[in-house]
Amino acid sequence: MNTNNKVSTKHAFFFALPSLVSGILERPAFYIIPSIYAKYYNLDLATIGTILFIARIFDVITDPLIGFLSDKTKTAIGSRKPWLIPGTLITSISVYYLFNPIGEVSAFYFAIWFLTLFIGWTMLEIPMAAWQTELTSDYDDRTRVISYRTIFNLSGGLLFAVFPLLPMFSSTEFNPEVMANIGVLIVVVLPIVVLSAIYIVPHKQVSKKSSVSEPLTDVLKSIAKNKPMQIYLVCFLFTGIGFGALNSLVFLFSDTYLLIGDKFTWILITISVANVIAVPIWNRLFNIWQRHHGWAIGVLIAIASVFFTVFLTPNEFSFYGMLIIALVYGISIPAYYIAAPALISDIVDYEQFKTGQNRAGQFNSIHYFTMKLNNAIGGAVAFWVLAIFNYQAKETVHTTEEIIGLKLSMTGIPLILIIISALIIWHFPLSKKKQTTISKYNARKQ
């Protein structure tokens, strides 16, 4: 397949379809499950934070390894597709046991299944991201394909948000019963959408000229020489840690402090609907703006809206305040969701231009490792700070010390990190003009 040809609507649709399930999975895995285990299974907040952090340390090995092996895999169906089947199997098994705890629920139980989930997820997401890079090298078409994945992912988030409202449940809260049923949904649907993508969407055989043949450790050397990648990783890390802390605590903040846990699903619905509506708007804006400028603008608006949670207290108006914040946040954050993976694809093109090597799998593994590290560090720091301020997740009345710790973790730390990252990413060196020139050069060398 010629990478300069635009991806058909049919192929873009089926390629993006697995992201629907990713959207259903990501929100509970990062934002709800840790709080569920704290509230309902009595796991200590500091212990949860430590488990989140340890799991990401393990990713230091698995993420680059899978990216490297994905680049090296050569089969009749391409380099990426063979990884998706075992990734789907491992993800499905771990989701079932993590979302539907069986037997004694301990810190060890949570750690094992949380770790296994992200091994399987890595085997899915990294090859998919590398495959995405290889589908097209056209600047605007790449944004279009990623917008498809983004809108499916956010639609999955919307499905997750409305799930507790189904009449089969006795409560609209996110509780163990709701999470168990979401787990079953993921286990049933994930294999269907992944196999559809494998069967319908064509793969691209990477030329022998550009395939990576050096040792795995050389990816670190290439990053040390790749200024756009260095800038990207700093900004992606700072932004991700900030939003990771925020997202890890927003359910706890709403449920145990504002006491509107029974209405939290409406907050998620507001964010998710705004996300889905905003994606086509941001996609059009990226045809006018540079992607990195859109990233900066989007995250600054998002964190500015979140700052107003500092002024919320448990009263009859807090729910409506959260809805307004959720609406603004939901409209602005898709800029980041679209820009970040598109920029990593541009960096892959730049790396091939500079070195002649296609490191799509390796660089996307670094991207996904950093993404999980972001959420883990953000979540771990957030829970550790709560433990320092002695926050009691099972209580409904909190001391001034506990409230300061909660708002510092969820708002103060993210605000500082995201402002810094937005100022840096604004000056990202790969413009649309430069990327277009690079992709044409790479195409001639194929």
Image (spheres, rainbow, N blue to C red):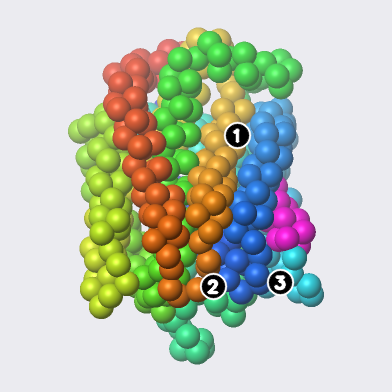
Q: What percent of the width, then of the height, locates residue 123?
A: 67, 45
Q: Which mark is residue 394?
A: 2
The residue mark sitting in front, 1 or 3, is: 3
Q: Which residue is mark 3?
A: 101
The location of residue 206, given as percent across then percent down, is 60, 25
Residue 179 appears in which quarter of the rendering? Answer: bottom right
**Residue 294 visible, this angle:** yes
Name the amino acid, label 2.
Answer: Lys
Q: Residue furthest right?
A: 103
For the point 65% across and 49% down, the residue is: 50
Give the CA separation, mark 1 to mark 2. Answer: 38 Å
Q: Residue at x 30, y 53 (%)?
A: 306
Q: Judging from the image, what secondary structure is the residue with disc 1 in?
A: helix
Residue 382 position in % (x across, y down) = 50, 50
Q: Look at the numbered disc 2 and give the secondary structure of its residue.
A: loop
Q: Which mark is residue 139?
A: none
Q: What secondary structure is marked by label 3?
A: loop
Does the segment drawn in magenta span residue 195? no
As shown in the figure, which amino acid type bears the numbered disc 3?
A: Pro
Q: CA distance from mark 2 to mark 3?
A: 20 Å
Q: In 3D space, how far apart are the residues under numbered discs 1 and 3 (Cα atoms)?
A: 30 Å
The image quarter containing residue 335 is: top left
In the rendered view, would you say 303 is above or below 389?
A: above
Which amino acid, by three-letter code, is at mark 1? Ser
Residue indicated by mark 1 = 365
Q: Is residue 354 above or below residue 82?
A: above
Magenta segment: 107-121
Q: Residue at x 43, y 68 (%)?
A: 398
**Residue 201 visible in the picture:** no
Q: How crowded is the residue under tag 1: few (<14 C-alpha within 10 Å), some, or many (20+)?
A: many
Of the two numbered discs 2 and 3 on the same chain, state the one appearing first in sequence. Answer: 3
Q: Main secondary structure of the magenta part?
A: helix
